[in-house]
């Protein structure tokens, strides 16, 4: 089956809109880190936030009035992806549209607020307005309501690789003739609580820059936003291979699985959009790349955009598609290529294929390959 | 969820937790599956569907489609959930839970009682299972999924969402409603769910025997669909309709044939299991007894 990208939407700390964000990446811009704090602790962290103006023109749908940030990011990205597709192919029948939503941490802000009320003042203060937004599939429910989807809607949870798993599920769904399109949306919201958790997990650094492929790794900065790809049987870029990879129990196993995924997707005409984010992931990917595709051009958007966990693999897919469309790759910020890796330099790239390698922080690795 | 609660309580208590406990690493919902895969040395990729209380049935349904499409020979599928303070208080805040007994489809039903647990089913291509002389417990023959955009937590009172899921399950199996012998209902005992589901069942299936296992074991949320699929398989094997206990008075607005309080012997060839969840997600699977 031919699995192609018919539309894309992108909500990031560098703004909203595929072309707008892409152009800023090509110019070598990085998101602005903002301090994040919480009354529960004096500890402060930095996170890359979606600018408020990115969401100012959302439709006045009743579902979005009280929705958490993650739902609004997802809605904006989904609306843009469908809008891009409509401008090329016309109206999209919601009855023939499936939805797959990918997420990792979910509606953390409302979940924390809901539970904080319980801890602080007891169960009687729990808000029935907040609780429904704590459910992982709340954003997917809002998206379905906004787009009029009454059929298939799945929410997948996982780590940074969950977006690839979502694309695979979309591929499976599109084998059913009942569907013409599947909208895949990955989204995440950043909160102090997540920063604190990842800091205690020794994966976070306090301030940018994120230094990619550095040994030893210095840590990542969390970010937020959403990415959406509308998949169809027709479109410009084709996803011609997906490898669901596997799980690792120990970090030392990550390089083996990443290598296996790369081996199955390897193509001499391909460059790699990696998930390197300044953590152990970088070393796993570096070893895998050196072994399986030595000399391949490698780019990761996470130095500029941060680690958006559940949204990150879809962001990588968008980067891969844009690099095929524009024949360019942005520069990797603040890092020199370590021996054995090649980073993009300014100018055109002539790759016919792009491999998306996604290694999550919590045990999942998967990948896919795009061609134009 | 409980790992996250422990972490947050400690953070709140200590105003700046210093050490890095296993709470964080164990919090993600995919962790139990990955741990189980590690324990059983299963290296296959996994997908974790989080469609609220329909997740278990969605997981079985998606696994069924993966196997029946020929993509996979065997899939382990199921659901799991554990009680937590956040969820308990959350359902209480919505006035969806009851301190009384759980009475699905009863006129005096007053809400759900939460439960917890897990169930895993091994799905395999029928020909391959027969070829290796496996003990086959039943055959999944149909799956339906629908989305009800009425409200984030309340079903459309018309029952249109559940009805579409059930119709789709029948359609995908190529079966008619008359061929189904029993429905294991979602049946949470909340006024809204049972009214919408009961309406959809009555319209589509007439006087088919219906019961909700949640009357006996509570609502185990993400695990419910998988646990209730096991109940359906056991019903097919034993040729017994599982009871809907705590049932006292029929709801005048629901024209249902409830398996009230005691199990009944019956000839059962095909059963349907329903699961519905927050977000308006609805899922139904159809299970068939295999001839000996």
Image (cartoon, coloured by chain):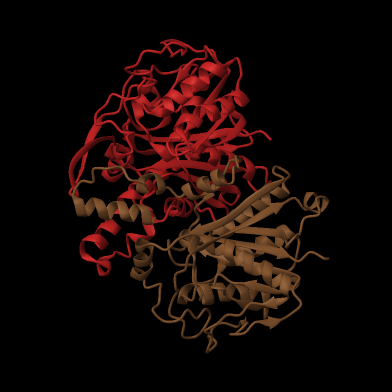
Residue A155 sits above or below residue B263 on the image:
above
In this view, the residue in front, B167 or A155, is A155
Q: Position of residue B36 (x, y in %)?
A: 54, 48
Viewer can see residue A67: no
Is residue A259 found left or right of A159 in the rendered image? right
Give chain B's shade: brown
In the image shown, does B250 or A25 lie closer to the viewer?
Answer: B250
Can residue B95 be seen in the rendering of this structure? yes
Tell me the quarter of the image containing the N terminus of chain B.
Answer: bottom left
Residue drawn at point x = 73 percent, y = 62 percent: B138
Query: Among all residues in the image, which is located at the extreme bottom?
Result: B249
**Residue in view at x 57 percent, y 73 percent:** B213
- Total labels: the figure holds 0
Q: Position of residue B37 (x, y in %)?
A: 56, 45
For the colour red, the matching chain is A
Q: Quadrant of the C terminus of chain B?
A: bottom right
* A295 shown above or below A264: above
Instruction: Say if A244 sits above or below A283 in the image.
Output: below
B180 lies left or right of A208: right
Which of A41/A84 is in front? A41
Q: Name the residue: 72% across, 70% down.
A: B236
- x and y percentages locating residue A290 in the rendered image: 51, 16
**A306 with respect to B126 (left or right):** left
State the residue in front, B115 or A297.
Answer: B115
Residue A149 in the image, given as x and y percentages of width and height: 53, 53
């Amino acid at each position: 089956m031919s699995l192609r990208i018919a539309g894309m939407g992108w909500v990031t700390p560098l703004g909203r809109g595929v072309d707008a964000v892409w152009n800023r990446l090509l110019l070598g811009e990085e998101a602005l880190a903002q301090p994040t704090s919480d009354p529960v602790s004096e500890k402060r962290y930095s996170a890359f936030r979606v600018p408020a103006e990115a969401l100012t023109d959302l439709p006045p749908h009743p579902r979005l009035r009280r929705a958490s940030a993650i739902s609004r990011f997802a809605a904006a990205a989904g609306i843009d992806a469908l809008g891009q597709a409509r401008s090329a192919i016309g109206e999209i029948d919601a009855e023939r549209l499936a939805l797959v939503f990918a997420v990792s941490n979910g509606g953390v802000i409302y979940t924390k607020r809901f539970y904080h009320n319980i801890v602080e003042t007891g169960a009687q203060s729990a808000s029935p307005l907040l609780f429904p937004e704590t459910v992982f599939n709340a954003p997917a429910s809002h998206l379905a309501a906004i787009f009029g989807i009454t059929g298939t809607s799945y929410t997948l949870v996982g780590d940074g690789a969950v977006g690839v798993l979502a694309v695979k599920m979309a591929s499976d769904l599109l084998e059913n003739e009942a569907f013409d399109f599947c909208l895949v949306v990955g989204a995440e919201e950043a909160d102090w609580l997540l920063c604190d958790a990842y800091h205690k997990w020794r994966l976070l650094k306090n301030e940018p820059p994120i230094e990619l492929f550095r040994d030893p790794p210095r840590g990542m900065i969390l970010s937020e936003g959403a990415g959406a790809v509308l998949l169809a049987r027709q479109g410009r870029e084709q996803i011609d291979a997906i490898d669901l990879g596997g799980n690792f129990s120990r970090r030392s196993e990550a390089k083996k699985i990443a290598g296996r995924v790369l081996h199955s997707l390897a193509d001499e005409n391909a460059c790699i959009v990696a998930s390197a984010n300044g953590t152990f992931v970088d070393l796993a990917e570096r070893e895998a790349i050196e072994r399986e595709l030595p000399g391949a051009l490698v780019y990761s958007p996470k130095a500029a955009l941060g680690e958006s966990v559940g949204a990150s693999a879809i962001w990588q897919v968008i980067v891969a598609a844009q690099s095929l469309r524009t024949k360019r790759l942005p520069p990797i910020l603040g890092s020199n290529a370590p021996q054995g890796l090649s980073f993009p330099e300014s100018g055109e790239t002539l790759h016919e294929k792009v491999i998306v390698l996604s290694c999550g922080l919590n045990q999942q690795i998967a990948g896919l390959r795009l061609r134009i | 969820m409980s790992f996250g609660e422990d972490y947050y309580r400690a953070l709140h208590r200590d105003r700046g937790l210093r050490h890095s406990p296993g709470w964080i690493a164990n919090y993600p919902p995919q962790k139990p599956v990955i741990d189980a895969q590690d324990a059983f040395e299963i290296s296959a990729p996994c997908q974790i569907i989080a469609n609220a209380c329909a997740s278990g049935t969605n997981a079985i349904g998606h696994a069924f489609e993966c196997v029946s499409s020929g993509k996979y020979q065997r899939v382990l599928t199921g659901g799991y959930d554990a009680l937590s303070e956040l969820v308990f208080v959350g359902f209480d805040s919505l006035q969806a839970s009851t301190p009384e007994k759980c009475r699905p489809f009863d006129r005096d039903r007053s809400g759900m009682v939460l439960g917890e647990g897990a169930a895993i089913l091994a799905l395999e291509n029928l020909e391959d299972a027969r070829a290796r002389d496996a003990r086959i417990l039943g055959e999944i023959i149909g799956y339906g999924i629908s989305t009800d955009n009425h409200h984030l937590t309340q079903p459309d009172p018309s029952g249109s969402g559940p009805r579409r899921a059930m119709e789709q399950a029948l359609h995908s199996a190529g079966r008619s409603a008359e061929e189904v012998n029993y429905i294991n209902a979602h049946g949470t005992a909340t006024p809204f769910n049972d009214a919408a589901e009961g309406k959809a069942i009555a319209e589509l299936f007439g006087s088919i025997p219906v019961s909700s296992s949640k009357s006996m074991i509570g609502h185990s949320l993400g695990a419910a669909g998988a646990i209730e699929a096991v109940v359906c398989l056991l019903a097919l094997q034993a040729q017994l309709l599982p009871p809907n206990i705590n049932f006292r008075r029929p709801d005048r607005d629901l024209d249902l044939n409830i398996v009230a309080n005691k199990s009944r012997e019956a000839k059962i060839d095909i059963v349907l299991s329903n699961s519905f969840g927050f977000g308006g997600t609805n899922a139904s699977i159809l299970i068939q007894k295999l001839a000996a």
